[in-house]
Structure formats: C-alpha cells, structure tokens
Image: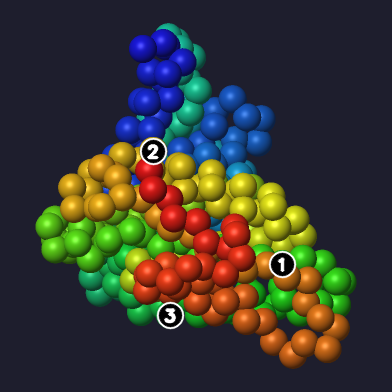
Amino acid sequence: MSSKSLKKLNKHLLWQALDAVPSPALIIDAQHRDRQVVYANPSVAMALGLHPNELIGRTSDSLADTIFDPVSEEPWRPRVAQGGCLELHPAALYDQPGKAGYWLLTTAVVDPPISPLMTSTGSFRAADLWTRGLRDERTDGTTGIPSRNSLVEVLTRDWSIARRQQQRISVIVFEIDALESYQNLFGRHATDTCLRRVAHAIAISLQRASDYCARVGNDRFAVLIGSVEEERVAQFAERIAQRIRDLAIHHPRSQLARYVTVSWALASEVPGLLAEESGLLEDAEARINVKASGEAPGRDGDLNVDAG
C-alpha cells in the first residue's frame, strides 16, 4: 500500500472512530490560515446548537469569543447552544514528523452546567446532549443531523426562491438497503452507529453552504440542492452512494452486496410560476417506494439501485 493510500485509510479510520464516540470531538486544520473545521462529530455539533455539516468549513474564530491557541495552557472554549462554554483540549495530529497538520479537540467540562444531568463540578455528560437532541424536533436524535421537519422548512423557503427566480431545485432521497435485516442481525446499537456513519458520509459530501441534508425516515436521508442541472445532481448522488459503500459496513444479509449500500431517487424541477407548493420530497420518496414494491421506476435516472 502506498503512503498516500495509507494516509487516506488512517484518516478514514479516525473519522469512523470519532463518529462512534459519544463525547464531543472536532478537528481543525492547523495549516489553514483561518484554522477551519474539517471534521465534527454529532455530539460536538449538538453541543454547539448546529449540525456537523454546518460546522465543516467554519473558522475557529467564528465559534468562540477567544482566539484558538493550541499552545496555550488554557482550553479553547467555543460557545454552546445555551450560552455556556464547552472546554476543548487540543492534541496535535501529525501528517509528517515534527509538523502538526491538524488539531484534534476533545471535551473536558461545560460551565455552567446545561441541565440537571450535568455533575455539580460541570463535567460533561454526553447523554445530556443526546437527550436534548431527542427533544428537539428539528434535529434527529440518533444522527445529529437535521430532521424531516427542518428539511421541509428549508425546502419550502428555497422552493419559493427558485420559483421566483426560475431556477432548478432538486431533492435526492437515499434509502439504506435492507436496514431492517441489518438491525435484526446486529441489534439497535449497531444500527444506530450505522445510521450515524451514513449520515456523516452524506453531510461531508455537501459542497456548498446552501446544500442541505436531513434524516427523513427510519432508513432514509434526503439532500436538497438548488441551481444545479439535473444530470450533475444525479452524478453527485452516485458519488454519495459510492462513498457509503466505501465505508465497508459489513452486511451479511444484504442481497445486493457484502456491505451496506443505498438506493437513491431524484426529483428535480424548475417550479412553475403559478405553482403553490413543492412536492419534490414526496415525489422522490414515491420513486423509492416504487423500487421497494418491485415495480419499474418512472424515467431513467429517477431511481438508482446501488448494487455494490
């Protein structure tokens, strides 16, 4: 294996490990002059009142009232959703000997405590963040990304803008193939981990600030994309499907592949000037349902079964 391939593998494994950790963690690019966030796990995103995709590309200065100084003895304190402060301690990640390429920041304490679940000393309790997420109807409690309600709000707004400006708007729905069989074999905990990894793979694939992803069903995720030609959106969906397959999540009961795969459906339109509301999400879901029922899909390209 080449050094470049090994480096890519190591990064992939690190991402997976941090996704599975319930306590907050994020990674900052040490070589970027603005020290941008390149990775955030669902727990830290929930603590900051955002979702992982919103954190990617953010500068450290935009997340805290103080400058991030990795050599300081004081922890870095980004603002949390309730107005308290989450303390993060940096550890250098070296991409070559003697030169830190990234900083991994992990939690210590939150002050003040943000709920009775926090200890009297202010020690961070990851379970508290997950509970908050479950109570928040705009955030999916399992994956940490936006929920269906949140996507519908954004879609309603963006669709109205697209209608006024006569621009294309698209929704892709991804469905994890045979997720029920996966859960029957491995159980709830492993299934939740699988869902988080798929959600993260989708979120980090988004290329523009206006792109939006959400969990819209038990085994379904959706991506909203505006002002992009339908063919390019389909190509983007294929790349996400490949990225999920490359996670290599073992699925011995899948009839499609050895690993977890997704099917996807695309609905895309330039809204008519007299149209009153968007049906894009429902249209994309209907095309996924066609696959599930074993019927033939509509137009070529509307439905893709990722067969691994």
Secondary element under disc 3, as helix, strand or loop, is loop
Residue farthest front in this picture: 296
Q: Earlier in the sequence, mark 2 or mark 3?
A: 3
> What amino acid is labelled 3 in the image?
Glu
Q: Nearer the viewer, residue 78 or 13?
A: 13
- The residue under label 3 is 137
- Circle nearer the viewer, 2 or 3: 2
Q: Nearer the viewer, residue 186 or 232?
A: 232
- Residue 246 — which label? 2
Q: x, y (%) of residue 133?
A: 37, 71
> What amino acid is labelled 1 in the image?
Ile
Q: Nearer the viewer, residue 66 or 152?
A: 152
- The residue under label 1 is 169
**Identity of the residue drawn at 20% across and 58% down:** 182
Local crowd size for mark 2, using a 10 Å CA cut-off: few (<14), some (14–19), many (≥20): some
Secondary element under disc 2, as helix, strand or loop, is helix
1 and 2 marks in contact (CB < 8 Å): no
User: Is there any visible trace of residue 130 in the rendered image?
Assistant: yes
Q: x, y (%) of residue 109?
A: 32, 53
Q: Nearer the viewer, residue 147 or 54?
A: 147
Local crowd size for mark 3, using a 10 Å CA cut-off: few (<14), some (14–19), many (≥20): some
